[in-house]
Amino acid sequence: MQLAFPPGLKPEPTGVPAGVSFLSNALHDTEFASFSLGCRFDSALSEAEQAALRKDVQAELVRGLEKALNKSFQPHGADVDCLLDFVCRRLELRLSPVYVCGRYNKFSRSLAQTTHYCFKCKGRGRGCAFCHGTGRLSEESVEELLAQVLVPAFGAARGVFHGAGREDVDVRMLGSGRPFVFELVEPRRRSANLEALATGINAGFPGKLRVSVLCFCGKESVSEYKNAEHEKRYAAVVTGSAPFDLSRLSPALGQRLSIEQRTPLRVSKRRPDKLRAKYTVLESVKPLDAASFELVLRASSGLYVKEFVSGDEGRSMPNLASLLGVPCTCTQLDVLEILDAPAPVI
Ligand SMILES: [Zn+2]
């Protein structure tokens, strides 16, 4: 955020007390432990003049602020970066993000993981005709439900959700949940009772969302979570027109099945067409009625389960339809558990 200088604030030693008071006021409702401070002086000044100002003004501002607010100066990785721009006469404050990680369960089949904004109007303003004035294309999302609670709790400008992988809108995320990091952008507060916030989230969205094991984490967790490869256990309801002969699956049960999977047709518009080597282990089958059964399977990270079931017009080989010898589709899917054992290298 930016704040205009008060009149009379000048880059000279006598201006230091006024500068400290301006900075103290600008930061009075911001929670932080460390700060950095830089100054931009007139570039027409010689290097020696600028060096003198850094010593007599910038260094004194740092000392004054440390004393006035009892905070520590930290040139890199501080909670707040202050830039006093004596050319444009404004103060720029950058509050470093706070990261909260945890696990979430999604119990609704109409809750997206993240919000998809309208690609025509980019969600700006009042939306457009394409998105019926909503600015968005997706249903309610885990991201925005978490933001409703976490963003005000940290006095943040907004929140960004980073999931360890994702599930489709119509897929529930059960078991002990999927790891995520929630990034709070420009937070005025850096501490909170995470247990109380989790309780609030869990009471606020029954039947939709539950979170657990919330804790503070560093920025590096975002890429760690995003790049982590987890095996997962799924429950799929498989439906077909012909009666199923489930005994055809018996030889495959408990066996590791290697699968060659091309990018599914349904996502081929936005993802490059690639052939991926994946695997699955069919764990159990349970008939539901003549036309459907429940299949529990373990799958390598990134296997498209719905396409493994249907075969996706031959783009997943082998597939469940080929094993059964009849066409079938996955009509309901749940992630039962994200397994933390690293996926074996294929
Ligand atoms: Zn739109």
Image (tube, helix red, strand yellow):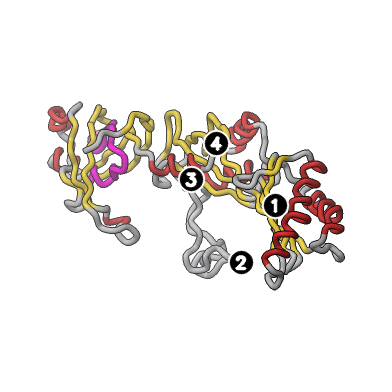
In the image, is residue 302 part of the stretch drawn in magenta?
yes
Q: Which of marks 3 and 1 is nearer the N terminus?
A: 1
Could you tell whether 284 is left or right of 105 in the image? Answer: left
State whether label 2 is within 8 Å of ligand 1.
no
Residue most extreme to the bottom: 44
According to the picture, the residue beneath numbered tag 4 turns out to be 217
Mark 1–mark 2 Cα distance, whole angstroms, equals 35 Å
Residue type, mark 2 in image: Gly
Secondary structure state at the residue bearing disc 2: loop
According to the picture, the residue beneath numbered tag 2 turns out to be 125
Pointer 4 with pointer 1, Cβ within 8 A: no
Q: Nearer the viewer, residue 198 or 40?
A: 40
**x and y percent of residue 291 in the render?**
24, 38
Q: Which mark is residue 37?
A: 1
Q: Which of 82 and 63 is in front in this view?
A: 63
**x and y percent of residue 175 in the render?**
42, 29
- Count neighbours of disc 1 (C-alpha within 10 A) and say few if under 14, some if 14 to 19, many if 20 or more: some
Mark 3–mark 1 Cα distance, whole angstroms, equals 30 Å
- Count neighbours of disc 4 (C-alpha within 10 A) and say few if under 14, some if 14 to 19, many if 20 or more: some
Q: Which of marks 4 and 1 is nearer the N terminus?
A: 1
Secondary structure state at the residue bearing disc 4: strand
